[in-house]
Image (spheres, helix red, strand yellow):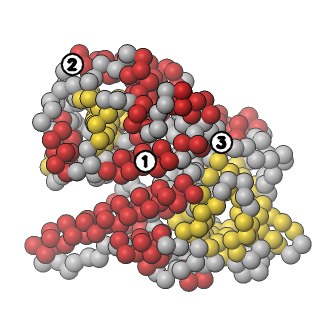
Amino acid sequence: MALLNFLGAIQQVTGSSYLIESRDGAKVLLDCGMRQGRREEQEGNREPFAFDPLALDAVVISHAHIDHTGLLPKLAAAGYRGPIFATEATCELMELMLLDAAFLQEKDAEWENKWRARMGKPPISPLYTTADAEQALSQRQAMGYAEPREVAKGVQVTFHDAGHILGSAIVEIAVQDHHLTRRLVFSGDLGNTCSPLMHNPSTLSRADVVLMESTYGDRDHRCSEDTLDELAEILQQAHRDGGNVLIPSFAVGRTQDLIFYLGRFYQEGRLPQQAVFLDSPMAIRANAIYSRFHEQFDPQDKAVFQSKGFKRIEDWLPILRCTPTPDESMAINRIKSGAIIIAGSGMCTGGRISHHFKHNLWRSDCHVIFPGFQARGTPGRAIVDGAENIKVLHQRIAVKAKIHTLGGFSAHAGQSQLIDWVSHFDHHPELYLVHGELEKMQVLQQALRERLNWIANIPEPGEQIAL
């Protein structure tokens, strides 16, 4: 019989990975994500794969975020040369993200080895290289939404719009088991129905087994209008205080949402700041990809863009200044007040936000806005949890800035949205919760039992089930 192996994002948020094995011997890997967060979780990225990469027939990717794609270069380095299937937009965004990830792996290893040399320790190798990323990218095969394709013998894949980021997909996999067809549906990351630009997640009705994310399984997000009002008030208060506003943001998805919201404030005369800096080369390039795929935007938002003759995301916010080069980035730090600075990384684990923290986090007139989830073990989570100081660029920096969290901006579905999405299946499929911290899964598990009278399973890492 066909088998499903739970390899990653099991009782944790990152590292998405599942292996499907058909009765006829086909092996298809669903996502190949990097673990993020605490050091011990990141060290897991260096462990050998729990399967033989050379035995895989295909890899299927739900969307471009690194926790779903970040180990593809490692897979290529291990010898995998088969196809990597994703939507067209995901294929483009993967190029952006994997080349950046490889560059960071190489730079981190270079930095670490300088320190290890001084300590008399042997050097380490990067997790993977730019050449590995380029090899993985050469294996991409684009698919459209709602276009079934056989990716391996007896295994058919169909992508449906997940509404999370551009190109994100709910993955429907039909596996032939003799004369029976077993249908697996993986939610991927389901979008928040209040998010701008993206469609609402597609609903499906048929499945034998469902894997559903549970990142925010313990709560609902605030109403988007309430969250926008809160953001507007924070920006007004920051303007009165005279300091800068720092927004750590993911380059793909979150940044484009923020530009849309800030542009709306600008159009309405509600944005007191006179300069918004996008200090993320990756986000700048992602904007260009979003602009090329504007036909995939939500019809209402697309109509607004078209009515004003906008061609690019940046057109929506005329005071946006993109700073791709290091010199342009460093010049921002000469500005002590009145600026909004959007920079990566989203969980403050590196990137240019670290430099802006160094220059602003210790200032009591600074405001820091966290518009999304902060995983355990990350500097962002430490700040949100009230740390008095954090380590930034090998220095301890006091946290004197005013800290704000805005969960309503999440690109993930909240609890009620998750329950509504899964309730559309015609009969009660076998349901497994993935992509969430254990306590959040347990809250969602209880809510599913109370609202739908459904039993939701929480798999163990490495668990294998029959489809």
Q: Which residue is drawn at 54% across and 36% down?
A: 197
Give amino acid for label 2.
Asp
Which residue, given by chain and number where applicable, does mark 2 sit on?
A: 241
- Between label 2 and label 3, give the one nearer the viewer: 3
Q: Is mark 3 on a helix, strand or loop?
A: loop
Q: Residue at x 45, y 58 (%)?
A: 66
Left or right: where 76 falls relative to 174? left
Residue 209 seen anywhere in this rendered image of the structure = yes
The first of marks 3 and 1 along the sequence is: 3
Q: Residue 288 carries which label?
A: 1
The quadrant of the image that shows the C terminus is bottom right
Give amino acid for label 1.
Ala
Q: Which residue lies furthest to the right in this view?
A: 179
Neighbourhood count class around disc 1 (C-alpha, 10 Å): few under 14, some 14–19, many 20 upward:
some
Residue 301 seen anywhere in this rendered image of the structure = no
Q: Which residue lies furthest to the left in this view?
A: 118
Neighbourhood count class around disc 2 (C-alpha, 10 Å): few under 14, some 14–19, many 20 upward:
some
Asked if labels 3 and 2 touch by Cβ distance under 8 angstroms, the answer is no
Counting from the top left corner in percent of width and height, residue 265 is at 40, 21
Which residue, given by chain and number where applicable, does mark 3 sit on?
A: 201
The first of marks 2 and 3 along the sequence is: 3
Q: In which quarter of the view is residue 220 placed? A: top right
Give amino acid for label 3.
Pro
Gap between marks 2 and 1 measured at Cα: 34 Å
Counting from the top left corner in percent of width and height, residue 149 is at 72, 66
Q: What element carries label 2?
A: helix
Counting from the top left corner in percent of width and height, residue 363 is at 16, 30
Q: In which quarter of the view is residue 110 placed? A: bottom left
